[in-house]
Image: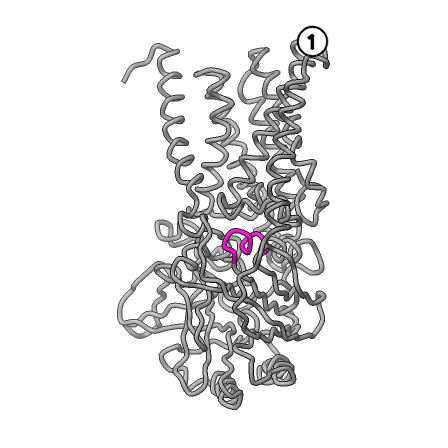
């Protein structure tokens, strides 16, 4: 599982049988009527190794060591418990129901993992194909959960083939139907996808963008050195590239690193400086990131903090801001927050947990969020404003496209984890958003990878990591919705519904077996 995942091996074909050893262990426990705890131990070891191996880079963030260990531990337990639901259903309801249940439990879990307090969908197994979107163009219909279903079905088929030989002592010759079915399940979806990829015709509606990568060290420079010098690193680079056709310049997440009050933005020297430069760009807008806050006369959310010696409260935000020529700015707050850094789960019920937050530059603790996904408009087109980690959330971006987004702009800072697999995975997973929505994705990263991804998931242009760079590129707007944009995670919603029904069925059968009644 680790070496099939993007940039911790990227050997994606291995994922089609990566689960087989665990399924064989589970089946042996089931056949020999061993205690179910044996399944849990093996499942936990499996998923703990998967979490550590595929996201080891979390450990490289300063102050993130404890958070990384906690993430590996908790996510491993959650995944192991989901696998146990399959085992219990198989044990108390039936074998066939158990294996069917594995699909519903795991896909339902991955969908829920987008939407609850401990959300961490980075390792959802449908992301495995981020390095080769050519074979999953049908994500435009299913989203990444379709890839999860594909992977699980193939693992169960190959498991059945191996178990017939190992446990039932059948000859390999009579497994021919299973072999053909497995090959067909690999070749047909990928072949159909390749045909769709090869025959895809882009919707052509060009705009010109300038993408900047200032390469400000997030640990030793960003929050301590002169802000004007930091801003000039992308402003001057952009001005060398802007033409009369340039619609927008992109600069990275928290490029304005000194917090300011959104309601008094005209009092912030950093904002006024950027506004003065944009006013000279002959209509070209600037889309960038900032640390901001707002003041309220009441506590409006878990992110609201009292201002000492007053009755007022303030909320801090990780914000994207659109600055246009002689117009008030538009602010959109990041809503999908990084656990432990920008969000403390369950702190609404347990406020003391806020003290456990990790300071990773800027403001620590739970930040304020938008009530619903938003889009922004400039120079006659509409775009989805995405900050960093939000690019993992395909359902959110699909909703922004339903609201009119014709292109996806991602601003991020991927320099927290040194030169590891983290920033590469983040950039690659954005390719799946392009496939799902049929939209160009434009990424401006503080320390790379900044890139442009076309409507079928190809990287058109990209920068290297840890370099000061900027480039100009033409991208095409698209307002035509894909099936996924129109209907969202149909598989996820339906499978998560059955997820809970299967838990109820398994619980009833368990109680009946032991003579217990309600």
| x then y, percent, for residue 275 | 48, 86
For this rendering, which residue is in front, 460 or 410? 460
437 inside magenta stretch: yes
Q: How many marks?
A: 1
Which residue is pictured at 43% across the width and 57% down the height? 354
Q: Main secondary structure of the magenta part?
A: helix
Q: Quadrant of residue 161?
A: top right
Say what secondary structure mark 1 lies in.
loop
- The residue shown at (66%, 23%) is 180
Q: Quadrant of residue 234?
A: bottom right
Q: Decide: is 369 above or below 295.
A: above
Q: Quadrant of the C terminus?
A: top left
Crowd rating for badge 1 (residues with CA inside 10 Å; few <14, some 14–19, many 20+): few
Residue 423 image point, x, y percent: 65, 58
Q: Tell me what residue is drawn at x 47 percent, y 70 percent.
A: 320
Residue bounds of the magenta highlight? 431-438
Say which of 181 and 272 sits in front: 181
The residue under label 1 is 169
Residue 158: in magenta span: no
* For residue 135, above or below residue 296: above
Which of the image's four quarters has the N terminus? top right
Q: Position of residue 488 (x, y in %)?
A: 42, 48
Q: Quadrant of residue 440?
A: bottom right
Colour scheme in use: one colour
Residue at image point 66% right, 30% down = 17
State left or right for residue 467 relative to residue 147.
Answer: right
Across and down, in percent, residue 176 comes to 68, 17
Could you say which is closer to the camera, residue 500 or residue 494? 494
**84 or 183: which is nearer to us?**
183
In the displayed structure, would residue 43 be above or below residue 266?
A: above
């Amino acid at each position: 599982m680790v070496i099939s995942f993007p940039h911790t091996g990227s050997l994606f074909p291995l994922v089609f049988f990566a689960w087989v050893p665990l399924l064989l262990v589970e089946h042996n426990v089931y056949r020999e009527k061993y205690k179910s705890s044996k399944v849990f131990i093996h499942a936990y070891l499996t998923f703990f190794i998967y979490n550590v191996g595929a996201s080891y880079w979390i450990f490289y963030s300063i102050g993130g060591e404890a958070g990384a260990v906690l993430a590996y531990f908790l996510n491993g337990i959650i995944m192991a418990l989901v696998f146990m639901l399959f085992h219990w259903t198989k044990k108390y309801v039936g074998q066939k129901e158990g294996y069917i249940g594995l699909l519903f439990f795991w896909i339902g879990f991955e969908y829920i993992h987008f939407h609850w307090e401990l959300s961490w969908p980075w390792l959802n197994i449908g992301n495995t194909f981020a390095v080769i979107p050519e074979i999953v163009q049908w994500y435009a219909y299913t989203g990444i959960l379709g890839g999860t279903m594909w992977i699980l079905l193939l693992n169960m088929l190959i498991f059945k083939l191996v178990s017939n030989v190992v446990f039932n002592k059948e000859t390999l010759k009579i497994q021919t139907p299973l072999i053909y079915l497995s090959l067909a399940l690999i070749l047909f979806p990928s072949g159909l996808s390749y045909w769709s990829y090869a025959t895809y015709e882009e919707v052509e509606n060009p705009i010109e963008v300038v993408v900047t990568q200032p390469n400000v060290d997030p640990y030793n420079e960003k929050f301590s050195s002169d802000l004007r010098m930091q801003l000039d690193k992308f402003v001057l680079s952009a001005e060398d590239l802007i033409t009369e056709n340039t619609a927008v310049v992109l600069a990275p997440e928290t490029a304005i690193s000194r917090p300011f009050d959104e309601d008094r933005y005209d009092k912030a020297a950093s904002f006024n400086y950027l506004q003065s430069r944009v006013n000279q760009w002959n209509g070209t807008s600037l889309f960038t990131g900032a640390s901001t806050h707002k003041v309220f006369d009441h506590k409006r959310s878990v992110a609201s903090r009292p201002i000492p010696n007053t009755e007022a409260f303030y909320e801090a935000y990780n914000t994207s801001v659109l600055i246009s020529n002689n117009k008030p700015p538009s602010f959109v707050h990041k809503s999908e927050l990084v656990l432990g850094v920008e969000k403390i789960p369950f702190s609404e019920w347990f406020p003391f947990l806020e003290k456990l937050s990790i300071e990773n530059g800027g403001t620590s603790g739970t930040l304020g969020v938008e009530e619903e996904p938003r889009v922004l408009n400039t120079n006659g087109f509409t775009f989805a404003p995405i900050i960093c980690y939000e690019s993992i959330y395909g359902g959110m971006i699909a909703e922004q496209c339903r609201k009119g987004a014709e292109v996806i702009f991602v601003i991020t800072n991927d320099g927290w984890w040194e030169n590891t697999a983290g920033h590469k995975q983040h950039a690659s997973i954005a390719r799946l958003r392009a496939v799902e929505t049929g939209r160009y994705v434009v990424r401006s990263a503080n320390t790379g990878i900044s890139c442009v991804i076309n409507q079928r998931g190809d990287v058109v242009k990209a920068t290297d990591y840890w370099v000061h760079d900027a480039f100009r590129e033409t991208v095409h707007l698209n307002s035509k919705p894909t099936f996924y944009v129109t209907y969202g995670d149909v598989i996820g919603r339906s499978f998560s519904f059955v997820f809970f029904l299967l838990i109820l069925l398994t619980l009833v059968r368990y109680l009946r077996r032991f003579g217990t009644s309600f």
